[in-house]
Amino acid sequence: MSSALNTIWCILRVPLGYPSGNSHGGTAIIIKENTKHYLLEEYKTDKIQATSVRIQDNKVETTLSAIYCPPRHVTTSEDFKNYFKTLGNRYICCGDWNAKHVFWGSRLTSPRGRQLYLATNDLNLHCVSHGVSTYWPADPNKKPDLLDFYVIKNIPLSQLDVEECTDLSSDHTPVIVNVHCQAVLIEYPQRMYNHRTDWDEYRAKITKSVNLNSPLNDVNSIETAIESFNRLIHQAAKESTPFLRQKNLNHFPYPKLIKDKDLKNMISQANNERFQNQLADLTPKKDTNYSLWKITKKLKRPKIHIPPIKTTDGKWVRKEADKAQVFANHLKDVFKPLPSKNTEHDKEVYEYLDAALQMCLPLKSVSPKETWREISKLQEGKTPGYDLVDAKLLKELPEKGIIHFAAICNACLRLAIFPGQWKIAQVVMIPKPGKPLHEASFYRPISLLSVQGKIFERMLLNRMRAHLSDVIPQHQFGFREKHGTIEQIHRITDIISRTLEFKQFCSAVFLDISQAFDRVWHEGLLYKIKKLLPHSFFPILKSYLQGRCFEVKYNNENSPLQKINSGVPQGSILGPVLYLIFTADIPTHEDTITATNADDTALMSVDKDSSTVSAKLQAHVFKVENWLDKWRIRVNQGKSDIHPQKRDLSTNKTP
C-alpha cells in the first residue's frame, strides 16, 4: 500500500508471453482502475522480462515495474542498465531478480548479483530489502535465500519501509514496500531512564513509597515483595525521566550560486565538501565524543542477512515466533541430564539426599552495608534480565531502598529459598563464528539473569569462600583467584620442558567435556554439596538449582517458559563455582600429573621407559572413564586428543 501515491498495487508473476514462445516466467501488475496511469511498452528479452506502468500523484510521475530474470542466462551489468534506462527518472522496480549479493541481504554473492550490484552503483540506485530469505526451494538440501527485492531511484529512503509477508505458501514470499508522503520516523523503545533523569526525584519517590514493615514470613510474601519493589523502581524511574523528543533534522546552508540546471550536482558536491571537513576534524578522543560512527552511520552499507532456521524434521521456519520456539525446543533438549549408566550409584545418591541434615550454624545475615558494597561493584551498561532492573537503577537507590533489599535477602537466607523471579533466564541466541546459520545447534545461548539475583548470589558466595579452599583441588585453575589459563599453560609447558631436558618420555591426554555446564546432573551436584559443604548451604542451594526456567527472545518475540532440568545457570555468579564443586573429585593418580582448567582436563605421564609411561597413563584414564560414567558426564571425542612425545637422543631435538 502506498499512502503517498494514494493507490493499492501489487506485483504478481503470471504466465505471460515469453520471448521464445514458451509459457513460463512473465510478469504482471495489478492496479486500481481509478488511479491515473498508463502502460509502458513491455520489456522483453531473453534475459529480462518486465511489465511497467507510470502513475501520477502530487504532480509527480512514478514508474512501477515488475521484473523477472530467468536463471539460465548470463546477464551483464549492461543488460540491467539498458532495462533501467527505460523506466525514466523516478521509479520502483521489484521482482525475482535471481541475483544474490550480500549487499542487499542475500546469503552469498552470485555472478549475476555482482553484475546487478555494479549496475546499481554506476546509476546511483538504491537496493531495498528486509534481509529475510524470499525463495524457499522444495529440495531440502538447498538453502533459502533472498532473491526478491526493490531497486529504487529518486525516492527518499526515509519515506520507505519494507515488510515481509509470510501469509502465502508459495516458494517465493512477497515483499511489501510502503511509500509515505513524509519521512518515516524510527520509533526507538523509550528507555526507563536517560541523561536527563532526575535521580534526586527518583530516590525521593522510592523513599516515600517503600514499605519496610512488609511481612516476609513465607515464599509468597517474598515473591510479592520482590514484585512490588520492581514495580516501584520502574514507576519511580519513568516518572523521574522526561520524554526525549526526536531532534529536528539539521538543514545545512548551500551556496547561493546554485543554478537550476546544476542543482543536483552542486548539492552533491556541497555535501561531499561538508562531509570531508567533518572527517578532517575528527579525533579518536573523548573531546569529539567518538563521533566517527555518528557521522558515517548514514552511509550506504550492506543489509544484514537474516537466516531462516531448520527444524529437526527438516522444515524451514520463517516467522520470528516460530524461530524462537525452535530455539526453545533445542535448548529444552540440551538442559536434560544424560541417561544413567550406574543404577546402584544413583540409588546411593538419592538415599543420601533423603537423609536428615546435620545441625549447624545458620548462614550469616546480610547487612545494608554489605548490600551497598556489592551493588557499587556492578558494571553499568549491561543488559538487564527478565525484571528490567539494571545496575544503574540499583546504584541510585536511596538508603531506605537498600535496607528493603537487604531485608528481602535476609528473608531468603532465613527461609532457605531462592525466589522464582530471580530464576528466570531470558536467552538470546548468538551464531557461532564459521558455523551454518540455519541450524539451531550452531547458536550459542546467552542468558540474561536478574541483577538483583546476581547480587544475592554474590553474597552467598562470600559465605562459601571460607569452605571452598578445602573443596576445590589444587590442580584446578579455572574460576579461582590468582589462578588462570596462562598459569596452567606455564605449568604444563614447564613439565614438558623438564621432560625433554632429562631425555624422558612424556605422554598426555587432553579431555574436553561435551556441554559441560549445561548437562550437570542436579542430584549428583546436590549430593556433593551435601558431602563437601556445611549443611546450612544445602537447602538454599537446592532451591537455587531446582525450578529454574528460561525463555528465548528472538527480536520482538518471546517463546513460552521452558523448564531447566540440568546444568548450572549460565551467566550466574554461583554457576562456575558449583561446576568446580561437581568436578572436584575427579580421580588423580600418584604416578601421573593432573591439570584442569574449568571443564578442560590434561592427564600427563612422565618416565624414562615408554611402556611404563603408557601403562601409567592408561590406568589413570580408566579411573577417569569410570568416574565420568558414574556422574553422567560425556567427553567430546572430537575435541579430545592424546599426544605421545619423547626426546630424540641422536639429534638432541624433539621429533
Image (spheres, helix red, strand yellow):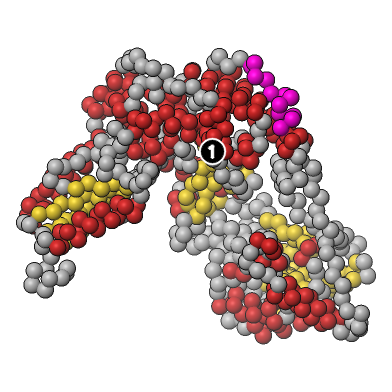
Farthest residue, direction front: 369
Query: Would you say 558 lies left or right of 33 here?
Result: left
Which corner quadrant holds the N terminus? bottom right
Which residue sits at x=61%, y=28%?
Answer: 402
Q: Quadrant of residue 153?
A: bottom right
Which residue range is magenta in the image? 203-214
Query: Would you say 73 lies left or right of 296 here?
Result: left
Q: Is residue 205 magenta?
A: yes
Please indicate, yes or no, whether residue 1 appears anywhere in the rendered image: no
Q: Quadrant of residue 231?
A: top right
**Residue at image mark 1:** 449
Q: Amino acid at mark 1?
A: Leu
Q: Position of residue 576 (x, y in %)?
A: 40, 40
Q: Which is nearer the eye, 229 or 399?
A: 399
Q: Which is nearer the eye, 307 or 451?
A: 451
Which corner quadrant holds the C terminus? bottom left
Q: Position of residue 547 (x, y in %)?
A: 47, 28
Q: Position of residue 617 (x, y in %)?
A: 15, 49
